[in-house]
Image (cartoon, coloured by chain):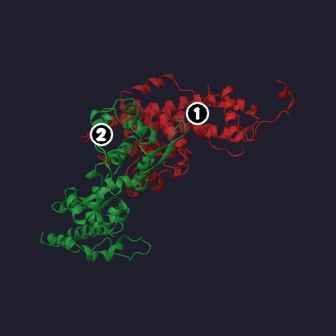
């Protein structure tokens, strides 16, 4: 007790004092009860469209608040989407495995096929939305998904998406992009990137600064294949059924994202509440990273803080309830909100 | 049809002559301007000319040619997939074929001729000096890494029931089939290994999903490392462990087959 009383009280780490959550997270995300029911199993196209519109509207307000924790929020959604993509392409890594692959690779090492998928989804969440649909970005993503012939496919795709999605409302644009890829690459594995492209188109339609990975996690059934797979040429009713599933998928995805934002908002508040108690040098940088990234490796060097200092900082943060250990291991720990 | 067979003869007999003309896939900055649209030709002749160009470029290149490169020699309205399909159709009876590997296309001799080519060149050919044929253990290790990557040497050893030495990993690394991946979160933080693009190209796969029986293994739920290491090993794989250092013809055949590419 004594030493802490003698030491002069330091002010909060620089840069953190201005970061206060403006709206309490619990009340800031109202989603009407009827919406959850409507999003679960809409009967008609109109129902689905209404639910998708309302849910995406709620999501829009969350994004427009541009909270300080939006980085970790988008990356968590990216992780969920990457886990689905990995299952679809026959990889066995779950979310924890993907996180390990990316965080435990030293710079210059290959992160492995699963890791590349996660990085591709993270690029959706971190690259500015306006540049997402350029040929270069798409080429990187196609390659990250483990598909061959990336450059040519990307240029081809970039041109056609631009043509297909100009004008109209954002949701229609996203669905048009999804259908475009599904239909034009019936056999090829390129279809795996359809959710990625649809989310990018949606973000551009809404004018969000960064895209949010949404639809992919909703399209997976138990085994991990896209629900929309059908070998035959689609009749108009089948096309309609697909639009219904996509709209309902977007409604559910948006609600899930809003729920996750409320959860992470609370955790971020808890972290920011204990942040002024941290007295280590470089603590501000670590807190910033915790708010911007899905997880931070306990042994990854951080500027202005030693390895031992970092370990103690994370121990202290865990004790104070600011962060959780995500991997469940006694070594190679990964911390996050 | 007469024109067609003449073209084929030209391809097979004129291999040597063409080698000084290899640089037709030079970067576009220095390339001479060529007429790609060919608007003065009637459609069928134009199509034939495009087919010829595409095949010539693929033939002259020493590594798989990407779609991007091919798009430089044909018109904007040209569908490269259809061109490739037509070329494949023409090559139906020939001892070599056009295969899609590692994100591009390449001429390769058909698998059936692998033994013949090997016996013709013997062990003294320049390719064999750099890469001796893979031993059965090495190819099994490589297969294991391909299916279960990222996987560490320790896990491989447990999987095979005997030590997989650093040398064996080193040989595969030297051939650029594998690279080091993320560190494994186990004591000692050993490197895990992942396969490279060169691996895909050498064995003629386009993506990792093209590995033989990938879907069957996936459906059986056997792609999980934990399951295999937990002793749930399928009988067929376990039985093959006994065979020691025999040569495995399939392992090195694709490289030897590609005679059209020799420099």
Total labels: the figure holds 2
Q: Is residue B111 left or right of residue B161?
A: left
Of all chains in the rendering, the one displayed in red is: A
Which quadrant is home to the N terminus of chain B?
Answer: bottom left
Residue annotated with mark 1: A331
Depth check, mark 1 against mark 2: the one in front is: 2
Of all chains in the rendering, the one displayed in green is: B
Please check whether the numbered discs 1 and 2 fall on a single chain. no
Could you tell me residue A63's position as x and y percent?
Answer: 57, 38
Residue A48's place in the image compared with B166, above or below, is: above
Marks 1 and 2 in Cβ contact (< 8 Å): no
User: Of the numbered discs in the image, which one, if any, rests on residue A45?
Assistant: none
User: Quadrant of residue A37 in the image?
Assistant: top left
User: Quadrant of residue B92 in the image?
Assistant: bottom left
Residue B51's place in the image compared with A45, above or below, is: below
Q: Is residue A250 left or right of residue B60?
A: right
Q: Residue at x 27, y 67 (%)?
A: B260
């Amino acid at each position: 007790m004594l030493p802490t009383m003698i030491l002069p009280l330091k002010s909060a780490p620089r840069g953190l004092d201005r970061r206060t959550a403006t709206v309490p997270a619990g009340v800031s995300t109202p989603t009407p009860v009827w919406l959850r029911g409507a999003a679960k199993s809409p009967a008609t196209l109109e129902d689905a469209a209404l639910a998708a519109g309302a849910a995406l509207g709620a999501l829009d307000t969350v994004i427009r608040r541009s909270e300080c924790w939006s980085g970790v929020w988008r990356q968590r959604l990216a992780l969920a989407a990457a886990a689905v993509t990995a299952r679809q392409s026959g990889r066995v890594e779950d979310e924890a495995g993907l996180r390990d692959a990316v965080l435990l690779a030293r710079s210059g090492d290959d992160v492995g096929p699963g890791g590349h998928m996660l990085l591709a989804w993270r690029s959706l969440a971190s690259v500015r939305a306006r540049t997402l649909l350029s040929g270069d970005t798409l080429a990187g993503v196609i390659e990250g998904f483990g598909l061959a012939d990336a450059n040519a496919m990307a240029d081809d795709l970039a041109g056609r998406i631009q043509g297909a999605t100009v004008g109209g409302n954002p949701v229609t644009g996203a669905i048009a992009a999804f259908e475009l890829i599904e239909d034009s690459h019936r056999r090829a594995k390129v279809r795996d990137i359809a959710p990625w492209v649809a989310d990018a188109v949606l973000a551009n339609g809404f004018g969000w600064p960064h895209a949010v990975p949404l639809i992919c996690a909703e399209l997976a059934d138990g085994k991990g294949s896209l629900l929309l797979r059908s070998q035959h040429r689609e009749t108009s009713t089948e096309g309609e059924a697909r639009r219904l599933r996509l709209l309902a998928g977007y409604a559910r995805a948006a609600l899930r994202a809003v729920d996750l934002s409320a959860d992470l908002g609370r955790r971020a508040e808890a972290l920011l509440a204990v942040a002024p108690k941290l007295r280590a040098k470089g603590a501000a940088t670590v807190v910033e990273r915790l708010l911007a990234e899905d997880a931070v490796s306990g042994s990854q060097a951080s500027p202005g803080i030693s390895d031992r200092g970092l370990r103690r900082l994370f121990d202290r943060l865990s004790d104070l309830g600011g962060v959780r250990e995500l991997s469940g291991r006694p070594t190679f720990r990964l911390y996050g909100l | 049809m007469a024109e067609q067979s003449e073209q084929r003869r030209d391809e097979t007999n004129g291999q040597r002559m063409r080698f000084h003309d290899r640089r037709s896939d030079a970067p576009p900055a220095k390339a001479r301007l060529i007429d790609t649209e060919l608007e003065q030709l009637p459609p069928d002749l134009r199509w034939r000319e495009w087919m010829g160009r595409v095949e010539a470029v693929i033939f002259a290149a020493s590594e798989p040619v990407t779609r991007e490169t091919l798009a430089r020699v044909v018109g904007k309205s040209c569908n490269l997939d259809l061109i490739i399909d037509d070329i494949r159709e023409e090559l139906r009876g020939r001892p070599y074929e056009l295969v899609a590997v590692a994100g591009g296309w390449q001429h390769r001799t058909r698998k059936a001729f692998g033994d013949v080519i090997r016996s013709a060149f013997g062990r003294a050919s320049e390719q064999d000096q750099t890469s001796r044929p893979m031993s059965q253990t090495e190819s099994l290790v490589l297969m294991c890494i391909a299916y279960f990557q990222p996987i560490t040497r320790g896990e491989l050893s447990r999987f095979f029931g005997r030590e997989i030495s650093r040398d064996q990993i080193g040989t595969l690394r030297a051939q650029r089939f594998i690279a080091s991946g993320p560190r494994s979160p186990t004591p000692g933080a050993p490197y895990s290994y992942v396969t490279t693009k060169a691996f895909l190209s050498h064995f003629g796969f386009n993506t990792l999903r093209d590995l033989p029986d990938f879907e069957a293994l996936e459906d059986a739920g056997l792609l999980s490392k934990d399951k295999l290491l937990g002793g749930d090993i399928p009988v067929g794989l376990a039985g093959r462990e006994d065979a020691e250092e025999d040569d495995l013809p399939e392992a090195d055949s694709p490289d030897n087959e590609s005679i059209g590419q020799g420099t």
